[in-house]
Amino acid sequence: MVKTKLLKSTIALTALSSLLLVGCGSASASKTDKADEETQAPAASENTDSVSTEQSPAAAGVFGEAFANGQVENNGSSFVRVGDKVYYRVMAPENVQKGTLGGWLDESAGEASSSIMSYDLKTGEATNVASVQGVDELYAVPEGLVVSSINYQETLLCPMDGSEPRSYLDGHPVAVSDNGRMIATQKYVDGESNYNNLYVDGNEVAKLTDEEDWGYSFKSSGNNIFALKEHYNTVDDIQKPYLYSYDENGNCTEYGQVQLAADDEYLTQASGLSQVLQDGDDVYLLFTYYQGSGGYYAGYEIHKLTIGKADSLTLVKASIPDKEASPEEEGVLDDSNMVPSMYLDDSKNIATAMNTVGTVGAEYSTDDNSSLVFYDKPDHSVQIKDSYFSTTDSNNQFLNSGAAFGDDVFLIVADTVSDPEQSIGWRDGYSIQQIRFVHINKKDGKEDVLETLKL
């Protein structure tokens, strides 16, 4: 069975303990008086006024034209399109753990460098454009490509002019605005403290500091970045999360406390803000829930706000199964495709689907294989390759990441064999034999293996 990754965002959020956003400084938000200082919103840094909405030198960089023309897709992922090029990071095989649960790739903090590759959509040629000691997803900004350092303490910039990658921002990147100018970063220090910053054109515009039992997650929408402040101690001091947004000037809007439909006990299984969908000034926010150590999908709820309007949060809809029921009783499987995505139907009403339009995935085709598919409509797929992934114990293939840009499909596939020594409880363990970076033409099915990493 080809499984879909469940726990990466949950694990990342769990690591974010002890945070506090300090002050708001929003030109557009009307501050709501609160007795508890914990409810106060983030502050813009002192240099906020120096950030201009006019195009800065950074916004006119090597990728500036692509951003201006709306030619940047899938930013902050394994495959990022900028103009006629698709960029991806090929990790060093010695930095990848051979043992795995569920076939997912886990990079260690090895010293070996990754290769940043550029695939030309016109010529079909792949070129190495940079070598960097970096990990995780790629983010495009007007100046080039950025990636986390191997210790997650800073963001590194690959300028695309042949020069060496250099330190760019404090903390590792976690969200980027549509115009590429605004980035949110996070930094975990000494196993105790977390720091979060917001930057515009490389200049800090807001700083987030510590407080016990609080954590933050970030999502971008247009040229705004949303910050969700969550409280982790739900035993002695139950708190609901708070929501803020920043525009590209660093101005903060406080939307107030999120009145979640799930009760406080159930909230302990929340995994933060899953999706943001914007329609003009209306913004919809999707929260998803999981159960147990296996991370079973357990429901969702959707809220709505008006961008830039303080305290405008309202609940739109919720679907939360009985928290006492087992996953089997609820018909919930260990598959993150059960988590819905949001979209607007033909009547501009908010609706949900199991898969996001424009993405690729795997669906069962036979007992021993799964097909590679493309979701052209909500809950409707088009087959790209029948029985493409083998799912036998002796040859189990896992789709780690995929993206489609027109007829061009890009995949990262882990080829594994069953390895009981890697298993934990009911979770099956595997040993990765090799990792393949693959390009497939969606129209004619022609396939090219761009890179093969032997472990």
Image (spheres, rainbow, N blue to C red):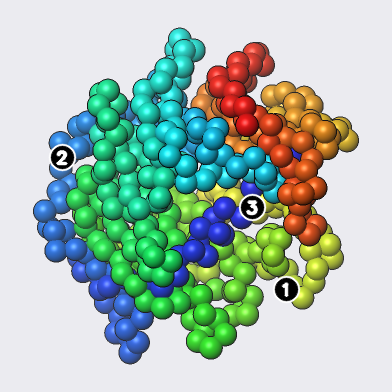
Tag shown at residue 240: none
Most foreground residue, 26 or 151: 151
Q: Amino acid at mark 1?
A: Lys
Specify the label residue 56 is tagged with: 2
Q: Quadrant of the C terminus?
A: top right
State the SS at label 1: loop
Which is nearer the N-term, disc 2 or disc 1?
Answer: 2
In front: mark 3 or mark 2? 3
Give the left or right position of residue 147, taking residue 238 as reference.
left
Classify residue 425 as left or right of residue 83: right
Question: SS of the residue at dot 2?
Answer: loop
Q: CA distance from mark 2 to mark 1?
A: 50 Å
Up the image or down, 217 lies above or below 34; here it is above
Give the labeled residue for mark 1: 323
In this figure, which residue is indicated by the disc labeled 3? 6
Instruction: Please rate how many residues cluster around mark 1, counting C-alpha atoms within 10 Å: few if below 14, some from 14 to 19, many from 20.
Output: some
Q: Is residue 88 left or right of residue 430?
A: left
